[in-house]
Structure formats: C-alpha cells, structure tokens
C-alpha cells in the first residue's frame, strides 16, 4: 500500500435533505481507510439529458464532468426506486457517458452501496447500476453492500451505531482501497 491518498468522487443518488443515503455516505466517510479521500460530486443542478444541449453544454454539466475526471475512483451511495436506480443518478451517468470518447466512467474503480428501510435493501437497484456501469467500461468492485436502514443506525455524530454494520462496511472499504490501489498502479 502506498502512502498516497486517492481522490474518490462521492455520488449520492438522492437529493432529499433528510436522505438516509446521504446519512450513510457521511458515516462511510467517517470510517473509511486513510488511503481514500472523498469529495462530493453533486447531481441536483444537472438538467435532464438532451442531445440538443451538446452543442454548448450547460455550466452545471461541465462542472459535473470536470469533477468526475478529477476523481480517481467513485463511491456511489444510492436508494432503490421501483427496483431500479433513481432517475437523477441515471441522468448523471448519461451525461458522463457522452461524448463516447470522453466517457468519464471508463476504467474507473467504482464501489456501490445503498440503504433502504425495505426488505431488499437496494439490492435490485444496485444490480441495475452494476450492469449500466459495466456497459460503460467501469471497474465495479465485486461483492455486495446492501444496508438495512433503521432509525437508530446512524447517530447524531454521523457515525454508525451498529458494530456489525460498521465492521462489514469497513471491510468493504478496505477492499475498495486495495482494488483502487491495484487499478491505479502504474
Ligand atoms: C419513487 C420511489 C420508489 C421507491 N422504490 C423503492 C424500492 O424499489 N425499494 C425500496 O427498498 N425502497 C423504495 N422506496 C423507498 C425508499 O427506500 C425511501 O424513500 C428512502 O428513504 C429513499 O432514500 P433517501 O432517503 O436516501 O432519499 C421508494 C421511494 C420512492 C420515492
């Protein structure tokens, strides 16, 4: 392991102020290994994808793709909507995938997780996302991280209150750090 920290773009697939996925993302940043340094990549100001806008891409789209290019890896934390990924996240992925020669996802290490109060815990939505990112040539970390949300999962100090979930996510993030390290090794 090198001593160089990698810049990880944090993408949260919910715009909601009280988003449980945003809370999970905050908690993950707290327990992540030191080799991963996160910066937030917002999605809320992106217009819906429209090829007509390609002639002069809006500033928000240029901001988004510039930040994605700066990211050496990504962590996506998302809710599941109707057994798929939220439209706001799909829209952002579509912007980042065009023009094809400048696809920001290709060969980037990406870890996925998400939380829901429901029984399936975002598993089906994450499978869709995995398929899309695979098509775009991203290197999606293997394994699964579906987090069951309960009101007491995350404390007011932004940390995970459940030791088992914290240990599970720490191990997942340790693997993500190693995976990123290997893929970025020159
Ligand atoms: C349009 C919509 C569709 C949803 N579909 C699912 C679903 O398929 N599976 C699930 O577990 N929860 C589903 N939910 C419930 C979400 O898990 C819940 O609203 C969650 O709080 C959303 O994440 P957020 O708090 O990060 O925005 C859905 C919610 C909405 C608004």
Image (tube, grey):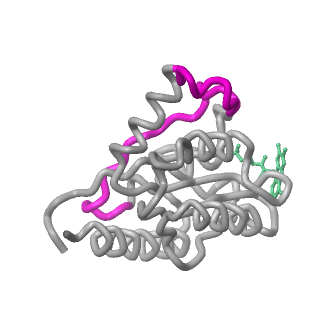
Instruction: Tell me if residue 95 is in the magenta stretch.
Output: no
In this view, the residue in front, 103 or 71, is 103
| Residue lying at 68% horizontally and 47% vertically, measured from the top left | 90
In which quadrant is the C terminus drawn? bottom left
Q: Quadrant of residue 14?
A: top right
Instruction: Tell me if residue 57 is in the magenta stretch.
Output: yes
Q: Quadrant of residue 72?
A: bottom left
Q: How many marks?
A: 0
Q: Is residue 39 above or below residue 119?
A: above
User: Where residue 136 appears, x then y in whole percent?
Assistant: 56, 60
Q: Quadrant of residue 153?
A: bottom right
User: Where residue 58 appears, x then y in whole percent?
Assistant: 54, 21
> Is 184 on the left or on the right of 53, as rendered?
left
Residue furthest out toward the right: 82
In this view, the residue in front, 77 or 150, is 77
| Residue lying at 67% horizontally and 40% vertically, measured from the top left | 91
Residue furthest out toward the left: 3
User: Where residue 38 appears, x then y in whole percent?
Assistant: 36, 48
The span shown in magenta is 32-58
| Residue lying at 58% horizontally and 39% vertically, measured from the top left | 95
In which quadrant is the N terminus drawn? bottom left
User: Where residue 176 appears, x then y in whole percent?
Assistant: 40, 70
| Residue lying at 79% horizontally and 69% vertically, measured from the top left | 120
């Amino acid at each position: 392991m090198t001593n160089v920290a990698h810049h990880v773009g944090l993408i949260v697939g919910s715009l909601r102020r009280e988003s449980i996925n945003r809370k999970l993302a905050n908690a993950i940043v707290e327990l992540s290994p030191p080799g991963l340094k996160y910066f937030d990549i917002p999605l809320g100001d992106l217009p819906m994808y429209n090829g007509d806008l390609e002639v002069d891409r809006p500033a928000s789209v240029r901001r988004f793709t510039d930040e994605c290019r700066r990211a050496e890896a990504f962590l996506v934390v998302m809710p599941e909507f109707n057994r798929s990924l939220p439209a706001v996240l799909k829209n952002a992925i579509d912007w980042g995938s065009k023009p094809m020669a400048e696809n920001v996802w290709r060969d980037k290490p990406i870890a996925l997780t998400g939380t829901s109060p429901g029984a399936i815990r975002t598993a089906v939505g994450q499978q869709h996302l995995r398929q899309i990112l695979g098509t775009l040539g991203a290197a999606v970390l293997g394994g699964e991280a579906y987090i069951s949300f309960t009101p007491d999962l995350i404390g007011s100090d932004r940390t995970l209150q459940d030791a088992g979930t914290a240990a599970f996510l720490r191990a997942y993030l340790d693997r993500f750090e190693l995976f990123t390290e290997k893929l970025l090794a020159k």
